[in-house]
Amino acid sequence: MSLSLYNTYTRNKEDFKPIHDGEVGLYTCGLTVYNYAHIGNLRTYIFEDILKRVLLYDGYKVKHVMNITDIGHLTSDADSGEDKMVMEARKEGKTVWEIADFYTKAFERDLKKLNILPPDHHVKATEHITQMIDLIKRLEERGYTYIADGNVYFDISKFPEYGKMANLDVNALKPGARIQVDAAKKNPLDFVLWFTKSKFSDQEMKWDSPWGRGYPGWHVECSAISMCYLGEQFDIHCGGIDHIPVHHTNEIAQSEAATGKKWVNYWLHGEFLVFNEEKMSKSKGGFLTLESLEDKGFTPMMYRYFCLGAHYRQPLSFSDEAMKTAKSAYNRLINKVIEIGKNRDSSKTNESFIKQVIDEFKEKINNDLNMPEALAVMWKVLRSNEIGDKEKYEIILDFDRVFGLELDKAEEMLKTQAEKKVDVALVEKLIAEREEARKQKNWKRSDEIREQLNELGIEIRDEAGGTYWRIK
Ligand code: AMP
Ligand code: ZN
């Protein structure tokens, strides 16, 4: 069964053919480590993990590289605004290096909690400055750059294919057609490859370069890092859809201009996680982290299950209600898996049914990673009377190589949930607060607290002797 993937570059679903038989080079844009990852970022990393797991399930050897953006990402993707890392460092009264280190560790913890397979190389941009300088030198030698106001720019007019993936109308954006953001640019879509001190005098992270002491533009890091580990041509590059018009467009331009070759064969982009009808982002409200979900009683695996419920090319709307639905489906799932796991000596085989469901599962996952339908196949297996629990258990654990829901640890999950559920100190504090509110006949507050406890999974009963509580 061949794997078919939607390639943003051609806007078509295509059969996947790797450059080298049986091997896949995969690059995924990493996080800008100036803050915690929000659950929107994490949706993209879950989608990329599913892609990787499907490739592994299909028998490919995968070499996966991800960068850590610890330098150069400005508040706008297109060279305007301030450096995100510098701003955060100032706010927190720390050095940029401390900020990068702290949030990189937090991000790696999140990936682990979500059972996302670690990349073979998860590397810092700041440790690949030499590769970036070399790439810029190559572009300079081939005539794709110009220097203005101390910065080195990529000249998009020298690269006729510019904006092809994003279907950009470059002419509509000729200078003067829009408000000029950076007067030094010949074309508003030109982008910075190397900044020098002329732009940000308070930039903490700086390196010597042939163009003066400074630091790289954001886009150049992904081209330099991916080529360093995967070669000048590789198979798949991913990110969220926000990266199509600027970041990935610029990555393609500078990579292909430097090598004169096609760079990446398949471009996959994940749709947004939306919150109150807007893209979840760090700068806007509704910034939720994995930890804040945990505080609401949703485990990382529940969030993973929630994400699997939507196709990666569909926007996914986040709300507490939607999460609660995912939570109860997930709890039904692990309870069912525990049950069949305990019953594993009861066997009843049915070869044709087994073949049918496995084929169906493979068809779904290979059809552009259709997780919602693959989950439906899993539920079909769990509900079936055609096979015994032993067979079901084996099939489900096999499917879980793709889902990554840690179903082999179902019992442990349930236990941790139960333990986590009762933050006794918090429950008692809320109950005391509620009793006080009731004494003052503040029924509104009392109801609010009851609801808060309810959300924590705690049921309360008011009796003559006081308020009693139990885990729901
Ligand atoms: P950044 O740190 O901004 O480069 O983002 C890291 C990854 O998260 C990129 O692949 C983005 O495309 C992706 N991303 C950002 N916001 C969202 C969102 N609301 N939903 C899904 N993915 C997102
Ligand atoms: Zn990137």
Image (spheres, rainbow, N blue to C red):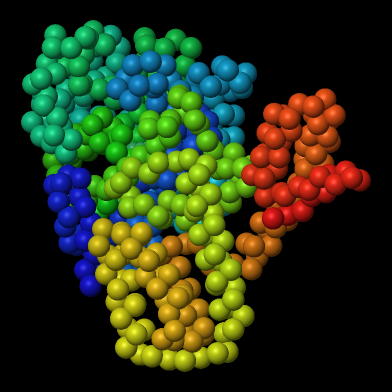
Q: Which of 281 and 216 is in front in this view?
A: 281
Please tell me which residue lies in front, 173 or 371.
Answer: 371
Q: Judge left or right: residue 134 versus residue 144.
A: right
Q: In this view, does 425 lie to the left or right of 86?
A: right
Give the residue displayed 33% in from the left and 63% down from the top.
373
**Residue 176: x %, y % from top left:** 14, 9
Name the residue at 17% across, 55% down: 13
Q: Where is residue 344 in the image (x, y as percent from the top left)?
A: 57, 85
- Residue drawn at x 13%, y 47% is 10
Q: In this view, does 163 lie to the left or right of 114?
A: left
From the top left corner, tell me how far across and down residue 185 is, in percent. 21, 13
**Left or right: 457 in relation to 310:** right
Residue 369 on image: x %, y %: 31, 59
For ligand 1, the image quadrant comes to top left
Q: In this view, does 376 lie above or below 149?
A: below
Q: Pick the residue in front: 469 or 273.
A: 469
* Number of marks in picture: 0
Answer above or below: position of 251 versus 398.
above
